[in-house]
Image (cartoon, grey):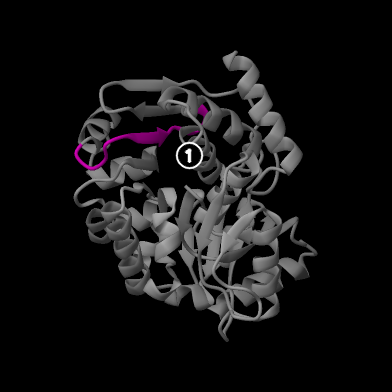
Amino acid sequence: MKYDVYGIGNALVDMEFKVNDEFFTDNNVEKGLMTLVEEDRQNELLEVLHTMQNDEIKKACGGSAANTVIAVSQFGGNSFYSCKVSNDETGKFYLGDLKENGVHTKYTPETAPEGTTGKCMVMVTPDAERTMNTYLGITATFGEDELVEEEIKNSKWLYIEGYLVASPSGQKAALKAKKIARENGVKVAFTMSDPNMVKFFRDNVAEILDGGVDLLFCNEAEAMEFTQTDDMMKAREEMKKHAKRFAITLGKNGAILWDETTFIDIEPYKTTAIDSNGAGDMFAGAFLYALTHGHGMADAGSLASLASSKIVSQFGPRLTWAEAKEVVNQFTESNE
């Protein structure tokens, strides 16, 4: 197989800022969630931050699935990412960053369409929680045309980002990609991405999960929202109907896995959390890397837990190449 993971999702340039809770109150921002906003609203918030001399601390090509396929690449896997950016400066930055991180994609700065590339403001508070205000730009029209069927067929796993359910064309593309994967023996993984996606686009999430997926990623809030219960034990039982295997992340309490026969508790690694941005994306990336490199569910969970503990202890949604190598070495040594 040419690729370990073929990801599909939104392409957003992440701009990260440190803020306090008052900023949310003063500017009417809902804390702890991803909110879609118009470009004017995003510019207004950026203006406030710049007036406060609060400059971005990180800028990188992002979007949930992009962070995941970059993690796969950094750990030593091969990945492809289907996304949509435009030929503006932000889009050129995005494609350059993707390439630097070893990820293959369809567009080049010369072939990308006209338009405005999406941007995501990631606001991190002292309690390490991340709040996102996203202007989708051209990625709102991500659709079937962005898929490269041959490359899906040449991959071990298809990884679908849950944020795509918010757009009719994104939903169609996700369903088509799943169909191509199913017809060609490619395993399908889906991440719910955000409690708001499950809350407001529940039917779309259910449509993607119809007929099941090989692996489902979600956090506690998403699992309970989707299964309409506030009892985690009931939620995890219900999840068995929708996925062959799944991983439910529990924040500082680690994760719970279902491997088709047994529940597996994954212990958390001790860490001081300063920024939860990208933790779930990194968990999925490390997990998929492990599964595509000969490891079982329990080992995949351990690597994912270790990698995401490193992510939350620093600013930004990804590791450096050296840090990724260090994580793999630590994991390999503990398995010997």
19 vs 53: above or below: above
42 vs 100: above or below: below
Q: Nearer the viewer, residue 200 or 242?
A: 242
In the current view of this chain or complex, which residue is farthest to the front? 1
314 falls in the magenta region:
no
* Rendered location of residue 268, percent (x, y): 53, 24
Q: Mark 1 points at which residue?
A: 288
In the drawing, does residue 168 fall left or right of residue 150? Answer: left
Res. 15 in view: no
Is disc 1 placed on a helix, strand or loop? helix
* Rendered location of residue 242, percent (x, y): 23, 43
- Tell me the quarter of the picture where residue 323 sits: top right
| Start-end of magenta stretch | 241-254
110 vs 297: above or below: below
Going 58% across and 43% down the picture, which residue do you hit?
A: 77
Crowding at mark 1 (Cα within 10 Å: few <14, some 14-19, many 20+): many
Going 39% across and 42% down the picture, which residue do you hit?
A: 218
- Tell me the quarter of the picture where residue 116 sits: bottom right
Question: Which kind of residue does numbered mark 1 sit on?
Answer: Leu
